[in-house]
Amino acid sequence: DTEVTQTPKHLVMGMTNKKSLKCEQHMGHRAMYWYKQKAKKPPELMFVYSYEKLSINESVPSRFSPECPNSSLLNLHLHALQPEDSALYLCASSQAGNVAKNIQYFGAGTRLSVL
Amino acid sequence: SQQGEEDPQALSIQEGENATMNCSYKTSINNLQWYRQNSGRGLVHLILIRSNEREKHSGRLRVTLDTSKKSSSLLITASRAADTASYFCAINNAGNMLTFGGGTRLMVKP
C-alpha cells in the first residue's frame, strides 16, 4: 500500500470557522509533511513531523495548527483563516532518517476555499 | 524559498516528440528528484538521482545531473497525451526536506 489518503477532498469555510484536514498513511513512514500549493505554483513546505514530533515549522501563521496523534495520522487544524489561505493543501510521507531514500508520497490534496 | 528554477515554464509538443525540461539550483545537494502533478492532484515521484550520479533512466524517462553547473534535465521520450502534466524538480540538501522548483507545464497534443 503506497497510498496517502487525505480528507476531505474539498472544503469551503468562512473566516470564523474551525475545521481540520486529515491525512493517513500505512506505509510505516515516520516523516510526514504538510504543503500549501497555490495555482500554477510549486508546493511550499509548511510543517514536517519526524517520529511524531514537529521538527520543522516554516514560519507558518498560528491560525494553522498541526497535530500528529500517531505514526499513521497527521492533522491540520484551521481557525480564523483568511481568503488568501485558499489553496490546495497536500500531505506527504516518507521514510525518516534515510536521506538516500527520502522519496515523498503525496496524497491527492484538500482543495480549500476560504470565504 | 524556491531553490530550483525550471525552464521552460511551459512546453507544448506533439505526441511522439521528445520533451526536455531543465532545472537549475543554487546550493550543494544530497539528491535531486523529479515529480509529476496532474492538474489539481497530488505529486507523483518519478525519479531520484544522487549527487554522485550523472545519469539515470526509468522507462521513457532520462535524467541527467551536472553538479558542476548545478543543473539537471528531465527527458521524456516518445511523449504521449497522458504525459500532459506539470513537472517539478525537487532539491534535497538537508535531512528529509525537499524544496521544489517552479515547475514546467507540459502539454502533449494528440
Image: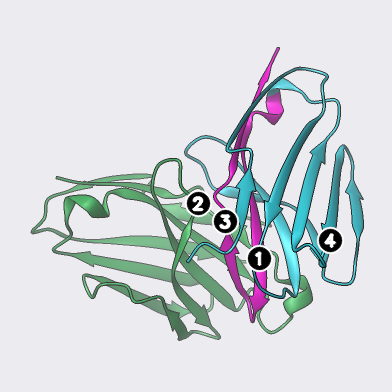
Chain colours: A green, B cyan
Please name the residue that numbered disc 2 is placed on.
Answer: A42
- Mark nearest the camera among 3 and 1 is 1
Question: Can the viewer see residue A28?
Answer: no
Q: Is residue B23 above or below residue B67?
A: above
Give how far across and how far down residue B92 sits, in percent: 67, 71
Q: Secondary structure at mark 4?
A: strand
**B23 and A70: which is toward the camera:** B23
Q: Secondary structure at mark 2?
A: loop
Q: Tell me the chain of label 3.
A: A
- Mark nearest the camera among 4 and 3 is 4
Label 3, label 2: how far apart the Cα atoms are: 14 Å
Label 3, label 1: how far apart the Cα atoms are: 16 Å
At 78% from the left and 75% from the top, the residue drawn is A100
Q: Tell me the chain of label 2.
A: A
Amino acid marked by disc 2: Pro
Image quarter in which the C terminus of chain B is found: top right
Q: Residue furthest front?
A: B69
Q: Secondary structure at mark 3?
A: strand
- Asked if residue A3 lies left or right of residue A80, the reply is right
At 60% from the left and 67% from the top, the residue drawn is B98
Q: Which residues are magenta?
A: B82-110
Label 2, label 4: how far apart the Cα atoms are: 23 Å
Can you tell which mark lies on residue B66? Answer: 4
Which of the marked residues, 3 or 2, is nearer the chain's N terminus? Answer: 2
* Local crowd size for mark 1, using a 10 Å CA cut-off: few (<14), some (14–19), many (≥20): many
Can you tell which mark lies on residue A70? Answer: none
Give how far across and how far down residue A27 sits, in percent: 66, 67
- Mark nearest the camera among 3 and 2 is 2
Q: Residue furthest left?
A: A16
Please name the residue that numbered disc 3 is placed on.
Answer: A106
